[in-house]
Amino acid sequence: HPWHEAGGARRGGGGCELHGRGLALAKRGCGGMGKLTSHEAAPKAPLWQVAVVLLLVQTFFAGNGLLVKLTMNVGTDPVVFAFWRDVLASPVLLMLARTPQLGPWRRPSGQGDFVQLALLGLTGVVGAQMLTPLALQYVEPTTFSVFQLMLPVVTPFLSAGLSLESGQGGDGRRMPRLSPDRILGLGLCVFGAGADLLSKAGMQGQRIGFALLTVQVLASASFHLLVKRSLQSGWPPTALIAWSYTVGTLELGLVLILVRPPTLVVNRSAAAVLVYAVVLTSVFNYIGMAWANRQLGPTAVTAFFPLQVVLSTFLQPAVGLPKPSTMDWASAVVVCLGLGIFMNGEGHGEKDPKDGVLPKTIGAEDCTEDERLHLKS
C-alpha cells in the first residue's frame, strides 16, 4: 500500500502494522511519524478532449437512429436486433476491458457488484436500448427526438439530489455544482433542439409509443447515474461497461424467451446496420460515455444529447432524406452556443480551490493526542 511506502506507516526494526482506524489516522499523518504522502488525484483530461469524445458519441447515436429506423421499416424485429447487437458487442467489450491501455481489469465479486451490474444491464441494455426500436414502431423519429430532450432536463436534478454533481468524485476530484452558467447552457441546448423539432412537425404517434419513450428516458437517465455511482465505488470505466453489457445481454435473452419472436434471423441490410451498432454505438459510445462520466459527471454526458437532434438533421441526406433548412442551421448555432456556455461552467468548476484533493503531505500536528496514542498502541 502506498501509505506503507511513505516510510511512516511501517518503520524499520519492530515495525508498526496499521489496521482499521489506525490506517485512517496514518493517512492523516498522525502519531508523530513524520509526513505521509497521500494519493495523487487521477489525471484529468482537458475539457476539449471530453467534448470531442461526447461530440463523436452523439454523431454515432444520430447515425444509429436513422439506420435503425430504416431497418425497422423493412420488417426487422426490434427485440431480435437489440439482442444480436448486445450478443456481438459483449465479447468485444470484455476483450477491450482486458487491454491495459484502457484501464485495469476487474471481475465482479460479491453480491454488491452483481446487484450493480444487474441494475446497469436492466437500465442501459434492456431499458435504454431495447425500448428504442420498440418505440420507433409506434412514433415518428421527430417524436422520439423530442423525448430524448428530456434527458438533459431530468438528469441534472436527479444527479444533484443523489449528490453526484457535488462532493468528491471517484478520481479524487470535487465535481462541479449546478452553477448558473451550466443551467443556462443546458437550457439553450434544449431550447435550440426543441425549436428545431417543433418547427418540422408536432408529436405524432400512438399512446403506447409515448409510454415506451417515457420509460426509455427514465431508464437512460438512471443508467448514467448508476454508472457514476459505480465509478465512485472503484470500477474502471471499460470493465464496468463490459460486465454491465454482458449481464444486460443475459437479461435481454430472458426477454427474448418471453417474447418468442418467429425468427432470430436478420436480413442483409440489418446485418450491415448491426456492424455499425456494435462497433460505434455500443463499443465506442458506451466506453466513451463512461469515461466522460468519470471526468465530468452524468449531467455533462446528457448535456450533449440535444446535439443528436441537430446532427440527425445534417445526416439525413446520406439516407435520402431532405437537406438541412435555415431553421436547422439556426438551431445548430443555439445548441453549440449552449454547449459552449455549459463547458465554460465545467472549466470554472475545475478551478475550484476546494477540489477535494488531499494535500501531498500532511503533518502530525493535525492529530489529537488521543489519536496519537491509538496509533502507537
Image: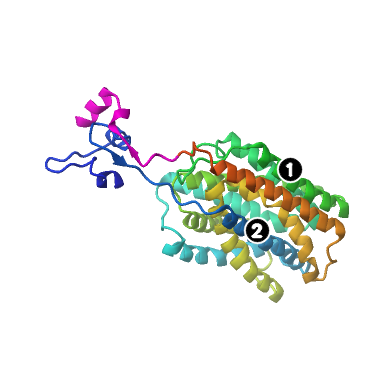
Residue 191 sits above or below residue 129 on the image: above
| Residue 156 picture location, percent across and down | 64, 40
Q: Residues within 10 Å of mark 1 (few under 14, many from 20)?
A: some
Left or right of 287 in this view: 98 = left
Magenta-span inclusion, residue 363: yes
**Which mark is drawn over residue 240?**
none
Q: Which residues are magenta?
A: 357-377
Gap between marks 2 and 1 measured at Cα: 18 Å
Q: How is the image coloured?
A: rainbow
| Residue 352 picture location, percent across and down | 53, 39
Residue holding disc 1: 187
Please tell me in which quadrant of the rendered image residue 61 appears. bottom right
Residue at (69, 50) in percent of width and height:
339
Please tell me whether mark 2 sits on a helix, a strand or a loop: helix
Magenta-span inclusion, residue 35: no
* Residue located farthest toward the bottom when viewing the structure as drawn: 268
Residue holding disc 2: 55
Instruction: Give amino acid for label 2.
Output: Leu
Residue at (51, 36) in percent of width and height:
167
Q: Residues within 10 Å of mark 2 (few under 14, many from 20)?
A: some
